[in-house]
Image (cartoon, rainbow, N blue to C red):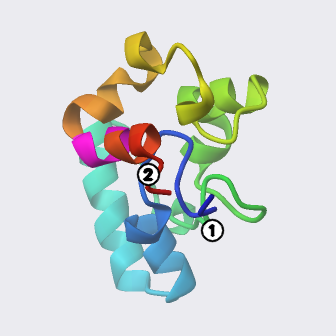
């Protein structure tokens, strides 16, 4: 299984936090912090935009490290991804991601990881 697929099925290699980290791109950190602050109605600082992947060892954004309910649930159940969970289809925790990103859902369902 590709390690850069998040628990929810999103591709971490396409995430702006990951891209800013691996490319040490301060402009992308600033842009992402502004966008995520607006989207989540909280203050996110550019220095908080650092992540090496949801399921890998290494640095993660504050949200991914400690606030992501999807990550907490999957890790708590010792699942490699939510695709391992028999309750994924009816799960309200992951529903928000899959409602707006069908590819993430299909990645977990179809084994395209």
Decide whether residue 103 is among the magenta residues.
yes
- Residue 52: numbered disc: 1
Label 1: element kind = loop
The answer to whether residue 27 is left or right of residue 17 is left
Residue 53 quadrant: bottom right
The residue at 54%/68% (across/down) is 47
> Which residue is tagged 2?
44
Q: Residue at x 61, y 35 (%)?
A: 71
Vertical relation: 45 (above or below) 110: below
Q: Main secondary structure of the magenta part?
A: helix
86 vs 105, left or right, is right
Nearer to me, 68 or 85: 85
- Is 11 covered by the magenta stretch? no
The answer to whether the residues at label 2 and label 1 have Cβ atoms under 8 Å apart is: no
Is residue 35 in view?
A: yes
Q: Residue at x 66, y 30 (%)?
A: 74
Where is residue 37 shown, x and y percent of the image?
33, 47
Q: Residues within 10 Å of mark 1 (few under 14, many from 20)?
A: many
Relative to residue 23, is residue 110 drawn left or right? left
Q: Position of residue 18 (x, y in %)?
A: 50, 70
Asked whether the viewer can see residue 68, the reply is no
Location of residue 27 in the rendering, given as x and y in whole percent from the top left corner: 34, 83
Say left or right for 78 vs 45.
Answer: right
Comes first in the chain, label 2 or label 1: 2
In magenta, the rendered stretch is 101-105
């Amino acid at each position: 299984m590709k390690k850069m697929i998040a628990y929810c099925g999103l591709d971490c290699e396409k995430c702006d936090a990951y891209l800013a980290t691996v490319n040490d791109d301060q402009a992308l950190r600033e842009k992402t912090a502004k966008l995520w602050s607006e989207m989540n109605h909280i203050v996110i600082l550019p220095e908080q935009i650092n992540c090496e992947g949801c399921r890998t060892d290494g640095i993660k954004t504050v949200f991914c490290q400690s606030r992501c309910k999807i990550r907490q649930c999957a890790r708590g159940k010792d699942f490699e991804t939510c695709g391992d969970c028999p309750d994924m289809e009816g799960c309200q925790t992951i529903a928000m991601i899959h409602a707006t990103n069908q590819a993430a859902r299909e990645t977990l369902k179809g084994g395209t990881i």
